[in-house]
Image (tube, rainbow, N blue to C red):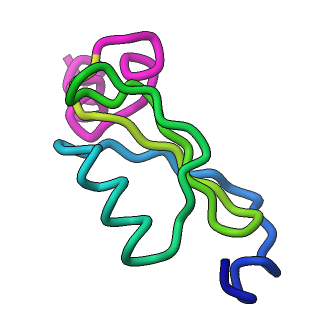
Amino acid sequence: MSAIAANTNATIIPSLHYRNALAAIDWLCSAFGFDKHAVYADGDTVDHARLTFGNGMIMLGSVGNDNAWGSASPSPTKSEAAKRSARA
């Protein structure tokens, strides 16, 4: 872990969705130095993952997973559908 990462304080933990979450995890770890804190996957579908960077963290999962975490997480597609429904 870099000195910059060790001295950070997290106040917001973003949640992201990726089409290929397993590849995204590998890329985020190699490109930016994130560490895998937890990865819960079933085959190619990542139900939930937590990557840490110093005191900071991001959460991520696969797009379209219909488990409890995936269905509760907002996505642009869900947000647009909700907006259209509210306008009708």
* Frontmost residue, 86 versus 67: 67
Horizontally, is 40 left or right of 87 in the view? right
Q: Is residue 81 magenta?
A: yes
Horizontally, is 16 left or right of 78 in the view? right
Horizontally, is 24 left or right of 57 in the view? left
Q: Is residue 78 magenta?
A: yes
Residue 47 in the image, given as x and y percentages of width and height: 39, 24
* Frontmost residue, 23 versus 88: 23
Residue range highlighted in magenta: 66-88
**Image quadrant assignment for residue 81:** top left
How would you classify the magenta stretch by its main secondary structure?
helix
**Image quadrant assignment for residue 84:** top left
Residue 69 in the image, given as x and y percentages of width and height: 47, 20
Asked if 37 appears above or below 56 in the picture, the reply is: above
Name the residue rendered at 44%, 65% in the picture.
Answer: 29
Asked if 57 appears above or below 8 in the picture, the reply is: above
